[in-house]
């Protein structure tokens, strides 16, 4: 079977878990929804293109290899914005959606220039710092609009700028996509090597001596040490709705000596 493998590394990344209230947690590895979002952006598929998003969700399988787990960073985040009533009034007055932060803040003024107070939104947002992963995707069906070659080309030349979970988290290295032939996603991930890893060698060395593989689906001869349930199957990008799925996990000790990176509360 043919897979598309690529490197995912950003100094700051977020892999969103279920968010309740003001807490915005991050998992320790990229989610299916994040990876599909990266691929969609590279292909030029927008969030509001529901049919294309649904086709990508149906077509792609996802697996990851954790090469460096990184450390946990918690950001006490404050943001100000007009309330929804004034946002709607501004959109109606302008006749177009709010496009920039400057326009959004101007929605706090009436037509006569009367100012209104901003709503302050507080949240605690989790990030992973210096986490490094190898990712592979594959086409589960042969009747879709994409090929593994077209996916690899999109990763080489993205239509939209990719980022690691949040727009404030740009990538530190190109994806460096590669086509791999293997019997399973774990076998494909074991083959992946990236020439640009020299630029993050110190971070890889500070990572864990244990590589963690995560994949979906059943594969002959591939046995997981445990299973986990993730809520990261995309139902609707515009409404931020996700379904659950089963994820398989396998850990392997590497021969490289490395120290664990501690997490901070």
Image (spheres, rainbow, N blue to C red):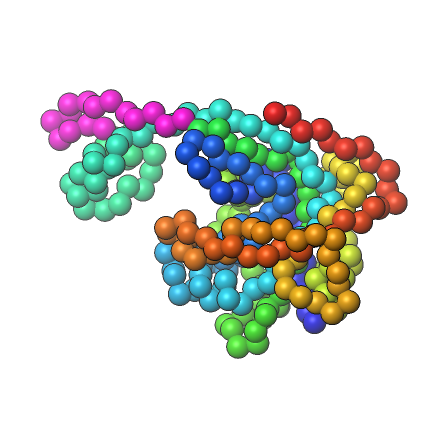
> Which residue corresponds to the image point at 59% horizontal and 41% vertical from the top-left?
27
Would you place residue 139 above or below residue 65 in this image? below
Q: Looking at the figure, which quarter contains the N terminus? A: bottom right
Q: Position of residue 260 (x, y in %)?
A: 77, 33
In the image, is residue 54 above or below residue 13?
A: below
Q: Judge left or right: residue 27 versus residue 203.
A: left
**Is residue 88 something one can see in this rendering?**
yes
Report which quarter residue 186 is drawn in: bottom right
Residue in view at x 64 percent, y 25 percent: 264
Which residue in the rendered view is the most extreme toward the bottom? 143
Query: Is 176 part of what is drawn in magenta?
Result: no
Residue 28 at x, y = what percent? 63, 41
Image quarter hosting the C terminus: top right
Question: In the picture, residue 173 is in which quadrant?
Answer: top right
In the rendered image, residue 230, in percent from the top left (x then y), is placed at: 56, 51
Query: Which picture quadrant has residue 236?
Result: bottom left
Specify whether 158 is left or right of 120.
Answer: right
Residue at coordinates 63% horizontally, 60% vertically from top-left?
A: 216
Give the image location of residue 143, x and y in percent.
53, 77
Which residue is rendered at x = 78% and y = 57% of the image? 190
For the image, the number of numbered tags is 0
Taken as a whole, is the magenta stretch helix, strand or loop? Answer: loop
The residue stretch that appears in magenta? 108-122
**Front residue (pair 78, 172):** 78
Q: Is residue 249 left or right of residue 171?
A: right
Can residue 159 be seen by looking at this rendering? Answer: no
Q: Is 229 in front, or is 10?
A: 229
Q: Is residue 71 above or below residue 248?
A: above
Q: Is residue 117 within the magenta segment?
A: yes
């Amino acid at each position: 079977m043919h897979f598309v493998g690529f490197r995912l590394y950003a100094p700051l990344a977020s892999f969103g878990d279920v968010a309740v209230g003001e807490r915005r947690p991050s998992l320790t590895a990229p989610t299916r929804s994040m990876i599909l979002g990266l691929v969609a952006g590279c292909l030029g598929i927008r969030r509001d293109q529901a049919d294309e998003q649904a086709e990508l969700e149906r077509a792609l399988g996802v697996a990851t290899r954790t090469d460096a787990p990184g450390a946990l960073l918690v950001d006490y985040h404050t943001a100000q914005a007009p309330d929804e009533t004034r946002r709607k009034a501004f959109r109606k007055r302008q006749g177009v959606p709010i496009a920039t932060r400057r326009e959004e803040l101007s929605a706090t003024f009436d037509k006569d220039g009367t100012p209104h107070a901003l709503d302050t939104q507080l949240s605690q947002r989790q990030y992973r710092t210096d986490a490094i992963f190898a990712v592979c995707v594959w086409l589960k069906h042969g009747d879709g609009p994409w090929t593994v070659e077209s996916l690899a080309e999109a990763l080489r030349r993205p239509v939209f700028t990719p980022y690691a979970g949040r727009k404030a988290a740009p990538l530190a290295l190109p994806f460096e996509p590669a086509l791999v032939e293997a019997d399973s996603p774990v076998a494909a991930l074991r083959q992946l090597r990236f020439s640009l890893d020299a630029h993050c060698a110190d971070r890889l060395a500070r990572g864990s001596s244990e590589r963690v593989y995560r994949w979906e689906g059943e594969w002959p001869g591939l046995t997981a040490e445990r299973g986990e349930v993730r809520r990261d199957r995309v139902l609707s990008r515009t409404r931020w709705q996700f379904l659950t799925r089963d994820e398989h996990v396998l850990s392997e000790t590497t021969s490289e000596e490395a120290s664990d990176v501690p997490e901070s509360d």
